Amino acid sequence: MSTREQHSAWRRTAAGANLLGPDGTLGVTIFEEMTALAVRHGAINLGQGFPDEDGPAEMAEAARAAILGGANQYAPGQGIPRLREAVAAHQERFYGIAVDPWREVIVTTGATEGIAAAVLALAGPGDEVLTFEPFYDSYGAMIALAGAEHVTVPLHAPHFQPDLAELEAAFGPRTRLVIVNNPHNPTGAVFGPQVLGRIVELAEAHDAVIVTDEVYEHLVFGAPHVPVASLPRAAERTLTVSSAGKTFSFTGWKVGWVAGPEELVARVRTIKQFLTYSSGTPFQEAVALGLGYPDEFFHGIARALAAKRDILAEGLRSAGLEVYVPEGTYFITADTAPLGFDDALDLARRLPELIGVAAIPVSVFCHDDGARRTRSLLRFAFCKKEPLLAEAAARLSRLSDLV
């Protein structure tokens, strides 16, 4: 392999997302692998985090009406005005955060593009980007593509909160960005006020920008979500990223947004306009409608999801697994060690045929040290219809008899 090939952009990206094998060959994502196994064996796929039912019919009708009404050409690169205004109103209504919809909000092709554009805009060779580990795989991919160094802070079971001493030690003179995924995928953890406050203090001390991934902001099961940007001295250095997909169960629409200080948003917009420029014009209209729904809608989706969490948690306990009950997100983590497993990846590859359920090993969201630490953990998605979850729970309850 040539030196040029070793340092090519696609190879950096693949390595950052843990897609390169020991011999340097390109593999498929774990999501592709588990989905293929689920299809082959007719298994219930609890691997990927997408719902199996659509969101509000009124929003779907709004998208159809927008299409029929001619909203089928490019939206403004910054997003349609109505959606930018709706995002700003949402931030003020739920969190008391004031943002200017004309200068401090941009619409992106899902939160994934928002995060990608932020990393590419603000980090580069010689910089360090800090995330928590396990980490959503796109973070590693984009950090590597930017040429920056990926530094992680471990999240320890059972509560998956960072140790404050380890958090402080991870910061250094080259720390440029801190990506805070809260509520956290894949663990389902919600960071407490002490952790969030310390992140802000350390970012301020090291002049780092905070990029928050808050796509599960309305899918929390205890205290209301606390955005980092709402904390003292945080707003001037924080880019808040969220999206409509998880909140409204329209993950295929890929409508997200970035909000924050004008100067930082402008840098992100510079990158974003050469990625997709704009997307999803009729869907933007529908999302603007959804963001204006009454509070009870948002409370109701969280209650419904918590009930689904509890169905799956009981099935996992019946299987003999140790269950770490999440405080938010679509996901629940279980430890397979009580059944004698120390390699959840191997078990995940067997589960679709063994009991007809597919899951994702947590180790794939980690670097080597983190993968060893999380070696026995599996992640299951519970954003499915209750009868399907009940069937999955029944299948899982037989696991201890089969291994």
Image (spheres, helix red, strand yellow):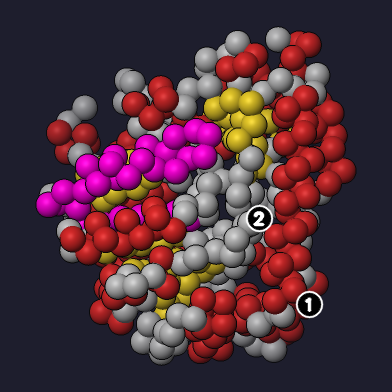
Which quarter of the rendering shows the N terminus? top left
**Foreground: 79 or 122?**
122
**Where residue 213 sits in the image (x, y, percent)?**
45, 59
Q: Give the residue pinned by disc 2.
A: 221
User: In the rendered view, does 338 fall on the left or right side of 395?
Assistant: left
Q: Give the residue pinned by disc 1.
A: 58
User: In the rendered view, does 393 fall on the left or right side of 161?
Assistant: right
Q: Relative to 35, does residue 231 appear above or below in the rendering? A: below
Residue type for callout 2: Phe
Range of the magenta residues?
154-182
Q: How far apart are marks 1 and 2 (CA)?
A: 25 Å
Which quarter of the rendering shows the C terminus? top right
Residue at point 39%, 53% (across, down): 195
Q: Residues within 10 Å of mark 2 (few under 14, many from 20)?
A: many
**Where residue 318 sits in the image (x, y, percent)?**
77, 25
Residue type for callout 1: Glu
- Which mark is first along the chain, 2 or 1? 1
From the image, state whether disc 1 or disc 2 is nearer to you. 2
User: In the rendered view, does 257 fall on the left or right side of 398?
Assistant: left
**Where residue 226 sits in the image (x, y, percent)?**
50, 65
Q: How crowded is mark 1: few (under 14 residues within 10 Å), some or many (20 or more)?
A: few
Asked whether residue 175 is in view, the answer is yes
**Where residue 172 sits in the image (x, y, percent)?**
16, 48
- Which image quadrant for residue 221? bottom right
User: In the rendered view, does 184 fall on the left or right side of 282?
Assistant: left
